Image (spheres, rainbow, N blue to C red):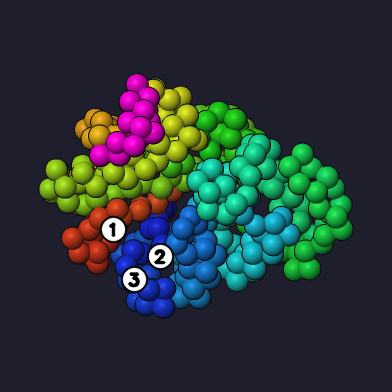
Amino acid sequence: MARLGMTIPLAGIPLADHRDWLREMIDLGYSDFWSSEAGGTDAFTPLALAAAWTPEARLGAAIVPAFTRGPATLAMSVASLAEAAPGRFTMGLGASSNVIVERWNAIPFEAPYARVRDTLRFLRRALAGEKIDERAASFAVQGFRLQMAPLAQQPPILVAALREGMLRLAGREGDGAILNWLSAEDVKRVAPIVHAGGPDKQIVARLFVIPSADRALARAIGRRAAAAYLTVPVYAAYHEWLGRGDVVAKVSALWNAGDRKAAVEAIPDEVVDALVIHGSPGACREHVERYREAGVTTPVLALLHADDLRTAIRQLAPAAA
């Protein structure tokens, strides 16, 4: 089965009103619902609702920051959702960014690789029912045992990965990787690093989509969205590594000088076209397939703009192909 996911919650739709939307998406052939966690809803509440409303769907968190919950609280959240949707929940764990962790949550964004690695190892042990009394490199846990564990089915844990260190961790100790803000060609570079860690690794990618024939509008929206990421240090370093160093340097210099408008305009059309899927619904579906061909096992759509949300969801669905 070729999987296709949708990011939830849908923009502008209250959580309480999502039931009919989710049910229709299942009927249209969407297989997955994936949440995120930045400055909107938390990652777990939308998935808990989807677990009850769509018992056929696979559910995923992409991602939960390793810094913003204590290890024990995070283990309880993961176990709760895994128990609510046995065999259907996939946990996505990542470092997030200095903006979310440090500026918004007042938590030092220090040693992100160690924090993700230590949290991943802790979750494995906690979900298996172990009593944990250990000092890791990035935190210490004294005498914790998850009362719900061991679960009948442990959820897969994917690592949000940008550059080589996290990609290797995703393949070596995780069940795969979650990718973000990259082109289909970029996938060909990063996926083999994950697969080098072992067989049967999942590659989930959040793909930003603007189903519109108005190319100028789509590029304007996509350019603003891309600028918001390219100016964050972890993503700037990521795109330098991917070969977009000249663009990153120019955009960052303008952004840091306070000329946000010029920074946005400095992103070339070809970069926007590579990172943001746009065009007619048919062209968008074809672009999504290029990611699949490059090695993505689950493309997850994230709609940046749609003239009519319900129409866009229907036209991008597997049933429309």
Q: Position of residue 133 (x, y in %)?
A: 87, 52
Residue kind at label 1, given as amino acid type? Ala
Q: Is residue 87 above or below residue 284?
A: below
Q: Earlier in the sequence, mark 1 or mark 3?
A: 3
Examine the structure image and report whether residue 29 is included in the region drawn in magenta: no
Q: Which residue is mark 3?
A: 13
In the rendered image, the vertical position of residue 250 relative to residue 123, given as above or below: above
Q: Secondary structure at mark 3?
A: loop
| Cα gap from disc 3 to disc 2, whole angstroms | 7 Å
- Image quadrant assignment for residue 310: bottom left
What's the magenta bit mostly, secondary-structure-wise? helix
In the rendering, at what x and y percent does residue 135 appear?
83, 45
Foreground residue, 37 or 108?
Answer: 108
Q: Where does the magenta region start and end?
A: 246-261
Amino acid under label 3? Ile
Q: Residue at x 59, y 62 (%)?
A: 87
Which residue, given by chain and number where applicable, does mark 2 sit on?
Answer: 9
Residue 317 got which mark? Answer: 1
Q: Secondary structure at mark 2?
A: loop
